[in-house]
Image: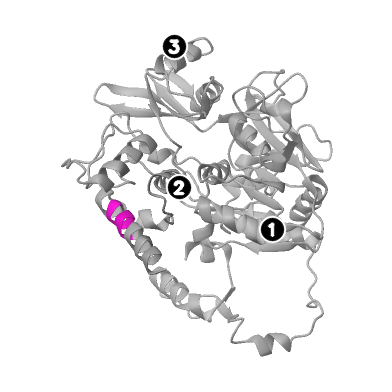
């Protein structure tokens, strides 16, 4: 209701199956309904099966509508620090500039099949839906269940003959955890969060081409791109951001708006044809983030991303975290992004996050670490490595090993879901009962990295999420030689419930074999 009102939506294109849900949402907001009730928008129902004859009767020519390049193409809402979403208004020329650049690099042709796996509320879905239009390529649309299940997604990619897949690091890790062997004819784009070198190595061995892409919603999807080769995957840490796309300028500036020297961290600012018009109806936020570009004599603007970066002497950009992840501890102001960048660069670390946590002993820094394949967590070694590069007050006092960092629906790190160092199993411990529960408990102990698992414990209450569920089910497949969908974990999240589901599935398959 808020989004429809804030954007001034006058028309909703939907279908009968979704109509009731939209009406309910509107009624809950302002007692309005579709079809213009009170201040509600009008509805156009497009039921493809029911209205096939009417659709066929429409003329094959384009509608007689002319839209200028400066007109708004879409408004996409992002989270706000105050809890009120803000709408980013992107003009047509910014979107066209982005798509034309992507059509050249990574490139697209009429024979390509582009996977659409991203929720439409995440701006990167624009590449999946609109880029194929420039070349007459095909779009293969994955349903929600397939996109969230590594096993199902891997099969779907092969069945649909997908040649271009764009995804966040979390989705790529989900595929790999499910045993995906890759497609050598696939062009892979990774963006939305920093790409670690260990993940890049794993992907390069399984795909034809790999690109690291970066960009905020306010500068139209992706602003930089990097073809990832052997040089970019050597060692630990993060893959660089690459070079700006067409008609885009990238600066690294200090607090006064001046360029910082090489290898010095500053705020990443972006200018050029990709800039949004600003935040719809929020002039105070617009002038705060969309500022005058001091390096352009034509008076254009640049966007302050709030991301930290540094430029190496060879011109390569490196991502170093966020400016708004600043905390205060014992009088010191600390940028969590700076600690995360150093922690993620330590040997054996695949991904890392840092948070300030309150405990019985007071506030302290906690590092959350995902180990690279074949590596273990050595808290002492991590602390020593950080002390060599950071002042003592910036070194976390505790480290938590995790199978994967918790994620938001958009595939970004969910900082609010990071567990406390003391988090363990649920109260009222009840030991696993029977072979199925005991074997499954061993799998949970390893996947969730918790000290114990009881039969009434909930997978998600122990810190699990969909990526870990995929890994856990891959282990279940190896242990019991059965295959369960990810939704089984949501339907039976307790150890006892899922063990019973495994037993029932196994017995059903044995009965089927007996009948045959």
What secondary structure is marked by label 3?
A: helix
Main SS of the magenta part reads: helix
Q: Secondary structure at mark 1?
A: loop
User: Considering the numbered disc 2 on the image, is that residue within a helix, a strand or a loop?
Assistant: helix
Q: Residue at x 69, y 54 (%)?
A: 127
Q: Nearer the viewer, residue 388 or 205?
A: 205
**Neighbourhood count class around disc 1 (C-alpha, 10 Å): few under 14, some 14–19, many 20 upward:** some
In the picture provided, is 329 more to the left or to the right than 194?
Answer: left
Q: Nearer the viewer, mark 3 or mark 2?
A: 2
Instruction: Report if the CB atoms under discs 3 and 2 are less than 8 Å apart.
Output: no
Residue indicated by mark 1: 161
Of the numbered discs in the image, which one, if any, rests on residue 22?
none
The residue that label 3 is drawn on is 392
Distance, label 1 to label 2, CA atoms, is: 23 Å
In the rendered structure, the answer to whether residue 376 lies left or right of residue 101 reads: left
Q: Is residue 35 visible?
A: yes
Residue 321 to residue 102: above or below? above
Whole-percent x, y for residue 257 in the image: 68, 27
Separation of disc 3 and disc 2 at Cα? 38 Å
């Amino acid at each position: 209701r808020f989004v429809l009102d804030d954007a001034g939506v006058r028309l909703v294109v939907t279908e009968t199956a979704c109509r009731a849900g939209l009406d309910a949402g509107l009624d809950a907001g302002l007692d309005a309904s579709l079809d213009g009730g009170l201040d509600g928008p009008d509805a156009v129902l497009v039921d493809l099966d029911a209205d096939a004859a009417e659709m066929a009767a429409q003329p094959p020519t384009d509608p007689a509508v002319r839209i200028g390049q400066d007109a708004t193409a879409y408004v996409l809402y992002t989270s706000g620090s105050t809890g009120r979403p803000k709408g980013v208004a992107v003009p047509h020329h910014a979107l066209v500039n982005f798509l034309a650049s992507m059509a050249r690099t990574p490139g697209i042709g009429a024979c390509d099949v582009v996977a659409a796996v991203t929720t439409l509320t995440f701006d990167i879905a624009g590449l999946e839906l609109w880029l194929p239009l420039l070349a007459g390529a095909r779009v293969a649309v994955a349903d929600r269940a397939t996109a969230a299940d590594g096993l199902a997604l891997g099969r779907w990619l092969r069945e649909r003959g997908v040649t271009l897949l764009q995804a966040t690091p979390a989705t790529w890790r989900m595929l790999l955890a499910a045993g995906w062997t890759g497609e050598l004819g696939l062009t892979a784009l990774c963006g939305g969060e920093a790409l670690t070198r260990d993940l890049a190595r794993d992907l390069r061995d399984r795909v034809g081409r790999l690109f690291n892409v970066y960009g905020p919603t306010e500068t139209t999807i992706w602003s930089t791109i990097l073809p990832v080769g052997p040089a970019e995957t050597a060692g630990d840490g993060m893959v660089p951001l690459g070079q700006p796309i067409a008609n885009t300028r990238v600066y690294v500036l200090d607090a006064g708006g001046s360029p910082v020297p090489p290898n010095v961290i500053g705020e990443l600012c972006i200018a050029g044809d990709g800039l949004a018009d600003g935040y719809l109806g929020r002039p105070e936020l617009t002038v705060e983030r969309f500022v005058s570009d001091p390096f352009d004599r034509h008076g254009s603007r640049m966007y302050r991303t709030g991301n930290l970066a540094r430029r190496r002497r060879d011109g390569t950009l490196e991502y170093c975290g966020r400016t708004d992840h600043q905390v205060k501890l014992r009088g010191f102001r600390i940028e969590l992004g700076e600690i995360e960048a150093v922690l993620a660069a330590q040997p054996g670390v695949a991904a890392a996050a840092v948070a300030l946590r309150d405990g019985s002993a007071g506030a302290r820094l906690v590092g959350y670490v995902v180990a690279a394949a074949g590596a273990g967590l050595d808290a002492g070694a991590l602390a020593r490595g950080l002390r060599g590069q950071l002042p003592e007050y910036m070194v976390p006092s505790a480290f938590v090993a995790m199978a994967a960092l918790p994620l938001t629906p958009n595939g970004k790190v969910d900082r609010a879901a990071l567990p406390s160092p003391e988090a363990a199993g649920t109260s009222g411990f009840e030991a696993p009962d029977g072979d199925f529960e005991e074997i499954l408990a061993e799998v949970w102990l390893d996947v969730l990295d918790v000290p114990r698992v009881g039969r009434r414990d909930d997978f998600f209450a122990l810190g699990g999420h969909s990526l870990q569920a995929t890994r856990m089910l891959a282990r279940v497949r190896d242990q019991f030689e059965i295959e369960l969908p990810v939704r089984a974990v949501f339907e039976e999240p307790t150890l006892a419930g899922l063990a019973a589901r495994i037993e029932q599935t196994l017995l059903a398959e044995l009965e089927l074999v007996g009948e045959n």
